[in-house]
Image: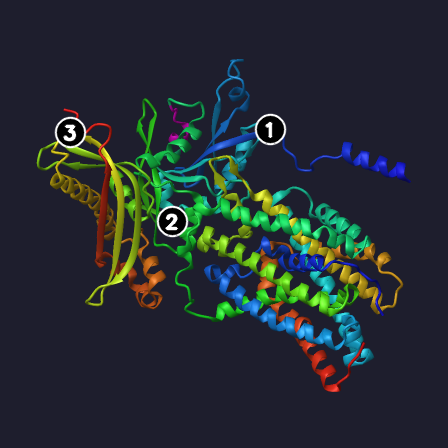
Amino acid sequence: MKQRLLLGLLLIIFFTGCYDRRELDDLAIVVGLGVDLADDGDILATVEIVNPQVLGNKSAGGGGEPVWVIESKGQTLFEAIRRMIHQSPNKLFFSHNQIIVIGEELANKDIFLVTDFLLRVEEPREDAYLIVAEGKAGDIIRAKIGIGSVPALAIEKMISSNWATSQAPMSQLIAFAKQTVAKAPGVVLGRIALRSEKEAEISFNGAAVLKRNKLVDWLTETEARGYLWIKDQVKGGTVVVKDTKYGGNISYEIAREKTVCRPKILQNGQMSIEIDIAVTSRFAGLTDSREIENPTAWSEYVLDLEEGVKREVRSVIDKAQTLQLDFLDFGALIKQYYPQIWQKKESNWDKEFPMLPVAIKVKAQINSVGMVKRSR
Amino acid sequence: MVLERINLAKKQIIYVAALFMLGPTFLIPPAQEIGSYGWIALTISYMGFLLLFSLYRALLNLAPDKSLFEILQLAFGRWLGLAFSLFYLFYFVFLLTLIVANFADFIDSVVLIHTPELVITIFLVATAAYAVRKGFESIARISDIILYTSVSIAFLVFLFLIDKISLDVFRPVWPSSWSPIFKSSLSVFAFPFGETVVFLSIFNQLGKPQKTMPSLLWGSLIAFISLQLVTVRNVATLGEFVKYSSYPSYDVARLVDIGNVISRAEILISINFLGMGYIKATTMYYSFCSGVAELFKLKSYKHLVLPVGVLVSLSSLLSFKTTIQNLYFIAEIYPYFVFVPQVIIIALAYIVLRVRGKKVG
């Protein structure tokens, strides 16, 4: 009996395996996905697949390109992706996909055509970056980047190291889903653009504003920074202020910041939003040295910086109010703090939002002059 | 008559009770449909459970040595008691089916997509059947390791997510309309808290109510706190998206990413689910088999285990096609149906015994 049992156990160990296993050499690992609208209204998907054999042993040489880009068309995104099997020897594997680029035309039509599939299917991850391309998404996926052998991974890095300028939102798919489900009137996604056809250089800056599922406008770098100030997502970057007194520019480097947004009822009973920004920064460049040791001049520097930040925040609020689209989600703030008042306002919010008074208070601190007091 | 004596330490009863209540709820947190108010529904339903608990305790104090089925026969007479007992057995096997279906559905739709559901179900049920045949003591013995790992995994995932958490979603704190909250509370009350009625059928095998009932209470407290942690974590991480996610805890763990080193923690959640669901399934399985044996005066429940396993595997395959149906059933139909065995029959039995003034056992 014991021997039979032992035999059975041995059989289990040696003669079984994972039912649904897929080995690395049977997978086409997708690292980037671009989705466009084809001319005939179909979905055109472009994927970037890494070639692990080339990536693994660079010294061996040969073996072709490190990445392979294929595209395919279908009535839905899923059909387009499944049809890629006609071109690829291996089945596409999406668990390592880092970026999802939406082409401008498709974003103009309906971005939900893409996001539903990505959220529903279990392979793609929700923390991939979801960004909108100015122009065709396929061109972005196909673009070569000077550094690193896998362009999609380079773009992913470009996005995640964007905190150093904080001029574009690091928008992930999950954040989009959260806002959409919460019925936010507008969503802001990062913008990626091809800078020149010849060099195939790309840049990730600014942002795309979507009215729920449709692209309505773009944000400039400054406006995107303003958006990030409001969302408390500025992690670094420079604020450049014109030096009115002495000429030239002063650049401040943002070290830390903390933003608190609260709705407030004004004395006349009107609803308003108050934005409090506390920013700590240091001098990063003075084109013209003022009397930096002089205490009165110092407070002017602080004021200049505060004005600079205020301008950035104001620019995005103006943009939102001219667009008549509350992509800053002030409505949700009012709902959080004054639920009763919000119930009355909710239906008419589109009309009320452009008139909403917004007070911006910036408290700046300059805590370092740098390694030198003066450079000339 | 006591079919079988089970020797368990107090601690083990606490762990089994806690895991039984947690069960699959770690994966599909209750009250997810009301999003950020989930914690309120959870608290209300736990209050309800405390009332239910005092009812159960009072009933067991009236008849300390009796099992649920004997109490039913004492209260309602032979035939009506038998009918109610059969109803309870049906409820047990039904709940077992539901859990197995839940399991297989999750594994089939998330982890092993191309594996036939039958294969998954057979292996799950076979493992459970093996444990049940070995007796309740062996089930209880693995409970502490499962509880420790599961709760610490839940807490660990919470810590890993600390930078992605936003507490703003909990504003406004009080809902504008309470009726959906109460409706969810009822469904949380039925699943998982009210399901502790199962323990009434095996507690007489475990010892005196003075020993078992406090353990049940402590177990429920552990379950409540852990569930609250999971609910708050999911809502704070996913925001309103939690309402539409099929497996919120799983989604939450997918978002874990600490410096590209600690990431893709979702498999931890699967381990959690398997461990806790296993305890729940085996407890239900054991209760059903020992209940049948007791009711039909069999010498042992052991030869019932395999046939029951086959029936459960098949009926779980036939029961639900998708998670949506499963969740709809749990939210919309199940709470009203199980209110009868969980509360009404027990309350009736208590009143009858009390009025008759019978002190039994």
Q: Residue A95: which disc? A: none
Nearest to the observer: residue A335 or residue A363: A363
Residue B16 rendering spot, x and y as whole percentages = 69, 57
* Secondary structure type for disc 3: loop
Which image quarter holds the C terminus of chain A? top left
Residue drawn 58% across the image and 27% down it: A89
Nearest to the observer: residue A12 or residue B318: A12
Q: How is the image coloured?
A: rainbow
Magenta segment, principal secondary structure?
A: helix
The range drawn in magenta is A138-145
Q: Is residue A346 magenta?
A: no
Question: What kind of residue is marked 3?
Answer: Thr
Q: Nearer the viewer, mark 1 or mark 3?
A: 3
Q: Nearer the viewer, mark 2 or mark 3?
A: 3
* Secondary structure type for disc 1: helix
Mark 1 or mark 3: name the one nearer the start of the chain. Answer: 1
Residue A150 rendering spot, x and y as whole percentages = 45, 26
Q: Are marks 2 and 1 on the same chain?
A: yes
Question: How far separated are the C-alphas under marks 2 and 3?
Answer: 45 Å
Q: Residue A287: which disc? A: 3
Q: Residue A213: which disc? A: 2
Instruction: Tell me where residue B346 sits by quadrant.
Output: bottom right
Q: Is residue A342 left or right of residue B274?
A: left
Question: What kind of residue is marked 2?
Answer: Asn
Q: Residue A24: which disc? A: 1
Q: Nearer the viewer, mark 2 or mark 1?
A: 1
Q: Are marks 2 and 3 in contact (CB under 8 Å)?
A: no
Which chain contains the residue that carries disc 3? A
Question: How far separated are the C-alphas under marks 1 and 3?
Answer: 55 Å
Q: Is residue A117 visible?
A: no
Residue drawn 17% across the image and 34% down it: A250
